[in-house]
Image (tube, helix red, strand yellow):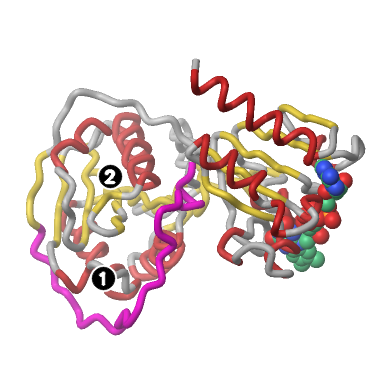
Amino acid sequence: MSILIFLDQADGHIKKSSLEAAGYGAAIAKQTGTVAEALVLGNVQDDLTTLGKYGIAKIHTVKNEALNNVDAQVFTQIIAEAAIAIGATVIVFSNNFNGKAIAPRLSVRLKAGLVSGAIALPDTSNGFTVKKNVFSGKAFANVSINTPLKIISLNPNSFTVAITEATAEVAAFAATIAPVKIQVTATNKVIGEVPLSEAEIVVSGGRGLKGPENWGLVTDLAKLLGAATACSRPVADINWRPHHEHVGQTGLAIAPNLYFAIGISGAIQHLAGVNRSKTIVVINKDPEAPFFKVADYGIVGDAFEVMPKVIEAVKQMKHQ
Ligand SMILES: Cc1cc2nc3c(=O)[nH]c(=O)nc-3n(C[C@H](O)[C@H](O)[C@H](O)COP(=O)(O)OP(=O)(O)OC[C@H]3O[C@@H](n4cnc5c(N)ncnc54)[C@H](O)[C@@H]3O)c2cc1C
């Protein structure tokens, strides 16, 4: 019996959100007296033995060029095969794009109950109950899974991983690889920027910044902090910023450790995508702006006066 964690990779490297899922799966293994094992598909350059420090005992790999791009149907079949082979009782994903595409398919295939978007370890004191966010983060639900095999996808940035000194055993898994039906013909990558979904710090701007010519206030601070940049939906809709930066209910949902909201009102649809951020700093000239209700720190002031001072202060801090 074991806990199987699916580890996502991009360009040959295990994603940060998957490492969090690994630590989460290892914690469930500890809690339930089982072992944490992981599955990696495609060609990975990372030294997988080091993932033992996240609590994984064994990593199963299926090295194959065809698996470098995700085909949810093919991946579902391989993960199902691995889960059966190792006798998994719980399968853990990160609730990222791939987790969202694969976990529901796997749930149907293996007749396993699924909780997507978990935010805490399961309560196993009386059954198996998992806490998750609902209504765009405005409420919680405790969902019980009653099937023998359980699937959980973990919301990124919701679990603190314990690091150990251990190393993991790595072994090839002989999987049946069905013909991949999706051919990736071209990939447009945003190069040289911190990916928004993985960023620890995000600096975000709204319509209060008046126009794209003023975005230096956002990008300068982001550069200094090694942060990703984001924006509200209208900003992307009027082409001040690219659509991949749009966060919120209809954009990307993020959960960085620190979220700067500059000239953003804090409409409910925007908050739906950012309210899982650990610390929220709001800069808005309107003291009644709804964003202040969820802010950890707020500055009531004109962004055009406040931001140069914030940027200068961060520069000073970095020189100390
Ligand atoms: C179905 C639906 C889905 C939606 N999905 C999303 C979504 O995913 N993401 C999203 O962001 N929105 C979404 N919206 C839109 C959302 O309702 C808001 O209209 C939008 O978030 C507002 O963007 P904003 O705060 O940048 O602009 P505004 O509402 O115009 O707010 C600008 C803010 O800047 C402040 N300000 C102005 N000048 C300054 C200054 N000089 N210095 C400091 N502050 C200043 C103002 O006080 C104000 O609070 C959605 C709406 C609908 C109906």
**Seen in the image, is 12 located left or right of residue 211?**
left
Label 1 crowding class (10 Å Cα cut-off): few <14, some 14-19, many 20+? many
The residue to which callout 2 is attached is: 3
Task: Name the disc covering residue 77, or none.
Answer: 1
In front of the other: 292 or 262 = 262
Label 2 crowding class (10 Å Cα cut-off): few <14, some 14-19, many 20+? many
Q: Amino acid at mark 1?
A: Gln
Tell me: residue 28, above or below residue 87.
above
Q: Does residue 71 show up magenta in the picture? A: no
Residues at badges 2 and 1 in contact (C-beta under 8 Å)?
Answer: no
- Residue at the spot x=26%, y=51% of the render? 13
Q: Position of residue 76 (x, y in %)?
A: 31, 68
Q: Position of residue 58 (x, y in %)?
A: 15, 42
Q: Quadrant of residue 65?
A: bottom left
Q: Position of residue 122 (x, y in %)?
A: 46, 38
**Seen in the image, is 300 located left or right of residue 108?**
right
- Residue at the spot x=73%, y=27% of the render? 297
Quadrant in the picture for the N terminus: top left
Q: Position of residue 42 (x, y in %)?
A: 19, 63
Judging from the image, what secondary structure is the residue with disc 2 in?
strand
**Seen in the image, is 301 located left or right of residue 46?**
right
Q: Quadrant of ligand 1?
A: bottom right
Q: Quadrant of residue 311?
A: top right
**Magenta stretch secondary structure, dominant:** loop
Tell me: residue 252, above or below residue 276.
below
Judging from the image, what secondary structure is the residue with disc 1 in?
helix
Real-space Cα distance between discs 2 and 1? 18 Å
The magenta-colored residue range is: 173-199
